[in-house]
Amino acid sequence: MSNSRRDFMGMALGGFTALGGIGALYAMKKSWDPLPSVKAAGFTTVDLAGAEENKLVVEKWRGKPIFVLKKPKDAKPNDRDVIIGDDRFHVSIGLCTHLGCIPAYDGAIQKFMCACHGGEFDTAGINLPGLPPPTPLEIPPFKIDGTKLVLGEAGPEYQKMLAAGIVA
Amino acid sequence: MARIENAKSIGEWLDQRIAIETLKKVMQTEYWIPKNINFLWAMGMVLAATFGILLVSGIFLLMYYNPSVDLAFDSVNYTIMTEVGYGWLWRHVHGVGASLVFLIIYIHMFTGIYYGSYKKGRELIWLSGMLLFVLFSAEAFSGYMLPWGQMSYWAGMVITNLFSGGSLEAYGLVEWIRGDYVPGQAFLTRFFMLHVLLMPLAIIGGIVFHFGTLRIPHVNNQDSEDFDYAEAAALYKAGKVKESKVIPFSPVFLSKDVFVMGVYFILFFFLVFYKFDFAMDPVNFDPANGLSTPAHIYPEWYFLWSYEILRPFSKDMGLIAFAIAQVIFFTLPFLDRSPNVAPANKRGFLFHMWFWLLLIDVLVLTFMGKLPPTDATFAMIGMVAAYSFFALWILLPIITLIEKKIKE
């Protein structure tokens, strides 16, 4: 019966080796995860109390430009607006949805204009028809905290947009 | 225990302990190579030599390169290029070598396809070779990140984004690969590790495996003739060198190889000293900036054909097409259903045409991939070439099934 003893030893050895191997793989996977410091830096807080009307503020969040625009009173309201107190804000990731260039804001005509391939967006971030961008500017996850906007955290207002299908 | 006696020479001393004579026979003096071959059969050793040069130049670059997002760009463009004695030489050798290694890989691949060197016992040679192609691609991509210029950053962004799988939106996987939301310090250091340690280790292993798969079925020849190696070897050993169909790998075949290498290295160093610019994208001489995308992002020339396959389709279809294009060459020994082992021109009109159309198609894809996406005519040519690429692979099993069997 030495064969069955050998089989047992083989299976026991193989089993523990596999267990250790799975453990090692798990550790390797976790080693490649973004570090806690990187994740903590994944939140950006913007104070909107001092924002000027019709003047674009560009913040940086997770390495991407974020557009924050206090909408002029005469601009058409939209469900995509972020409402803080009596003011309506346009908040979006400032990358053209065509090929990822950064559009510029022209306050006089109240439009975002992309220099790369001529894409245009209105103050709600919606792409104007007949131009290259396929979709509106993307809205990052946000949470409203008084007059402050926390980017990277999904607050109730963002959840509502999510439910309405405004953000993906 | 082995018989250990007083050795009369170092060779004998080693032979008693590690059977060096046997090793030399198996790997050199009695490793038989057919006579009926041409310069294209030297590409394997040309590749091995180029890899050696990449390794040596890489070691010297490694001594001054600094894998930090703040210092990487300057350590390459300032320290290595202007301060380090002959630092520019290592960089240009490394850049040109990386480009030429792919040129030779493609020649090596199409030689194999033309002469049927992936068939009947040689399937593993093809598969291990394709594995090396993938490893070299990963090595080239990870190395491209290191100067941390605009092209490094945005190529890193775009290529890692591919792993989101389009509509699958697997951004968690993308962030895991990057170790950050966008390419940053964690990204640069891990690709540095991949480029200087893990990938080279895997490539060296791959080369050993590739050589191993070649030893038993032997190298193919110009007429894909299946002759008796033992008989041919016996003739050679009996002194009938002229009548024998084979020569030993070393020193006879190797001396042919070295001649081809000589010609190749004239081209190599001409490029290193006079035309190194082709391997240095001007956009990459701007430091990485996550808030400004270059107007036109394109890969190095050797990835253009598969990049062009990605472009004409919608996002999801493009990704699927791209993924298939990356692995389709692996299936060649299995999609070719013909029992014929012969050069393409002797396998009948259809396969002969198939070979040249595939080669031309890959060339067209390469040229179209370099052009900006805005020109309608070129976009159309690119689209036709991308569809043709898949059509050719779908046709392969059909045309090889109806291929007439060549009589022995």
Image (cartoon, coloured by chain):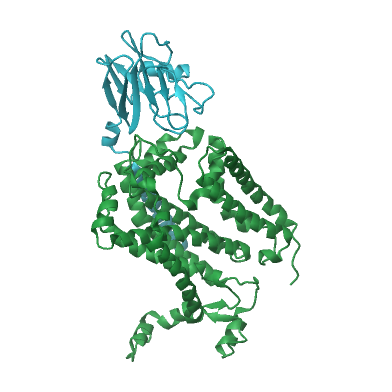
Q: Nearer the viewer, residue B110 or A16?
A: B110
Figure check: B342 above or below B64: below
User: x, y percentage for residue B43?
Assistant: 51, 67
Indicate the colour of chain B.
green
Q: Is residue A150 visible?
A: yes
Q: Quadrant of residue B200?
A: bottom left
Q: Nearer the viewer, residue A31 or A134?
A: A134
Indicate the colour of chain A.
cyan
User: x, y percentage for residue B367?
Assistant: 54, 49
User: x, y percentage for residue A140?
Assistant: 38, 25
Figure check: B382 above or below A95: below
Q: Quadrant of residue A115?
A: top left
Residue drawn at the location 64% of the way across and 47% of the way down: B388
**Total number of numbered labels?**
0
Residue drawn at the location 26% of the way across and 46% of the way down: B68
Figure check: B181 above or below A165: below
Locate the C terminus of chain B and report the quarter of the image it occupies: bottom right
Q: Nearer the viewer, residue B325 or B206?
A: B325
Locate the N terminus of chain B and report the quarter of the image it occupies: bottom left
Residue drawn at the location 76% of the way across and 70% of the way down: B407
User: x, y percentage for residue B153?
Assistant: 36, 42
Q: Is residue A22 visible?
A: no
Figure check: B235 above or below B249: below
